[in-house]
Image (cartoon, rainbow, N blue to C red):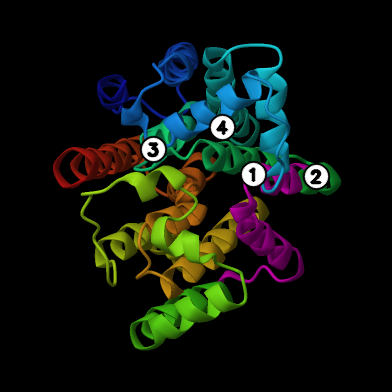
């Protein structure tokens, strides 16, 4: 699919030939991703999938409903266990992970939806949160879907539902509510930048503080929201100030700065997405030394591809804009490939 994108880079973005091919092949690509994730075997290689399967089998065998946390996901798991098997359950998990991203892309970007969907799929964390951190992945997809709704009341209901699928979405929800009252990106940029020296100097304080007030659980900082990780003996963790993750996060910050500050791009939904990203990523920067801090970082990373490509699909910045988009997709895919194959 990347080869097709590159091969058509010489065409104009809005040309009929380009759009027809992207529409048809894009739908095939969407179905392939859904089936590839949804029909994977139940296997320990997919991390927390084993834990989800154990919990599902307990419900399947008659265990009572347990809704200590993430009640909407728990009701979903319990309901499927009473009517179908684990393979159906995991396929539906993939469905609720991939389909909202498809409809978000179609709603926001119209005929250019393929490019946004494609950059989301080739993102560094896409595969991980479709196969390992499953309920977190579903929650973030619902969150993006909610943001695309026209009525604020409907949007808010879907965003709240995402927090009931995974409670960590309270942080993006907080960012969303903040943008309803104040949506000036300059302030959010300054806040993100301020959090870097604060974390360098007082990182331990913020980690302990958020643990003490219950915003971040101790379990989250030793293996955030991943029971399976606690059993992964012999796995060497990279701890300390994660400059590599900060560099990855800065791609979205720099892209947002370029569009909003330098090019004076004004789009209310984009500004909202960017500011939510800055809020969530700034929080992660404060506790960046935590083990498995990438799980906290994902609360902003799931928006990263959208932050980078959104304005290029809505506004003309360059004469050869299609080629610029293709180069960005190649670089973005290359980063994901290097990180997954050679580093992690």
User: Where are the magenta residues, as a range?
Assistant: 158-185
Dot 2 corresponds to which residue?
157
Q: In this orientation, which residue lies closer to the viewer: 158 or 45?
A: 45
CA distance for labels 1 and 4: 10 Å
Identify the residue under disc 4.
101
Mark 1 vs mark 4: which is more N-terminal? 4
Q: Position of residue 220 (x, y in %)?
A: 48, 60
Residue 209 to residue 280: above or below: below
Pick the front one: 270 or 59: 59
| Residue 171 shown in magenta | yes
Give the class, few, some or many, for how many residues have Cα within 10 Å of label 3's Cα (few <14, many ≥20). Answer: some
Residue 246 magenta: no
The percent coordinates of residue 118 (x first, y second) are 42, 30
Q: Is any part of residue 255 visible from this angle?
A: no
| Viewer-nearest residue: 13 or 212 | 212
Looking at the rendered structure, the secondary structure element under dot 4 is helix
Q: Residue at x 34, y 28 (%)?
A: 44
Q: Residues under labels 4 and 3: Cα distance?
A: 15 Å
Q: Which residue is mark 1?
A: 143
Q: Nearer the viewer, mark 3 or mark 2?
A: 3
Q: Residue at x 64, y 11 (%)?
A: 84
**Quadrant holding the N terminus:** top left
Q: Quadrant of the C terminus?
A: top left
Q: Residue furthest right?
A: 153
Q: Does 73 sit left or right of 91 as displayed? A: right
Pointer 3 or 2: first along the chain: 3
Magenta region's main secondary structure? helix
């Amino acid at each position: 699919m990347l080869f097709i994108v590159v091969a058509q880079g010489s065409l104009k973005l809005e040309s009929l030939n380009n759009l027809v091919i992207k529409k048809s092949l894009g739908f095939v690509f969407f179905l392939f991703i859904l089936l590839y994730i949804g029909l994977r075997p139940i296997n320990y290689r997919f991390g927390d999938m084993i834990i989800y399967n154990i919990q599902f089998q307990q419900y399947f065998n008659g265990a009572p409903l347990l809704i200590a946390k993430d009640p909407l996901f728990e009701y979903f798991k319990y309901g499927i266990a009473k009517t179908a098997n684990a393979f159906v359950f995991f396929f539906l998990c993939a469905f609720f992970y991939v389909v909202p991203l498809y409809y978000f892309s179609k709603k926001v970007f119209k005929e250019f939806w393929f490019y946004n969907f494609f950059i989301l799929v080739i993102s560094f964390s896409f595969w991980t949160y479709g196969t390992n951190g499953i309920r977190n992945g579903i929650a973030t997809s619902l969150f993006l879907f909610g943001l695309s709704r026209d009525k604020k009341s409907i949007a808010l209901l879907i965003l709240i539902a995402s927090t009931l699928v995974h409670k960590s979405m309270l942080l993006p929800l907080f960012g969303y509510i903040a943008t309803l009252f104040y949506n000036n990106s300059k302030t959010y940029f300054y806040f993100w930048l301020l959090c870097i020296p604060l974390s360098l100097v007082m990182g331990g304080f913020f980690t302990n503080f958020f643990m003490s007030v219950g915003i971040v659980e101790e379990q989250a900082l030793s293996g955030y929201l991943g029971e399976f990780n606690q059993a992964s003996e012999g796995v060497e963790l990279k701890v300390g100030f994660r400059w590599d993750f900060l560099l990855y996060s800065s791609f979205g910050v720099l892209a947002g700065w370029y569009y909003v500050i330098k090019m004076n791009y004004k789009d209310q939904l984009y500004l909202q997405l960017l500011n939510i990203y800055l809020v969530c990523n700034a929080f992660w920067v404060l506790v960046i030394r935590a083990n498995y801090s990438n799980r906290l970082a994902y609360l902003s990373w799931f928006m990263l591809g959208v932050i980078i490509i959104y304005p290029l699909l809505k506004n003309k910045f360059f004469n050869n804009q299609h080629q610029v988009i293709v180069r960005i997709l190649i670089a973005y895919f290359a980063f994901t490939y290097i990180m997954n194959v050679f580093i992690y």
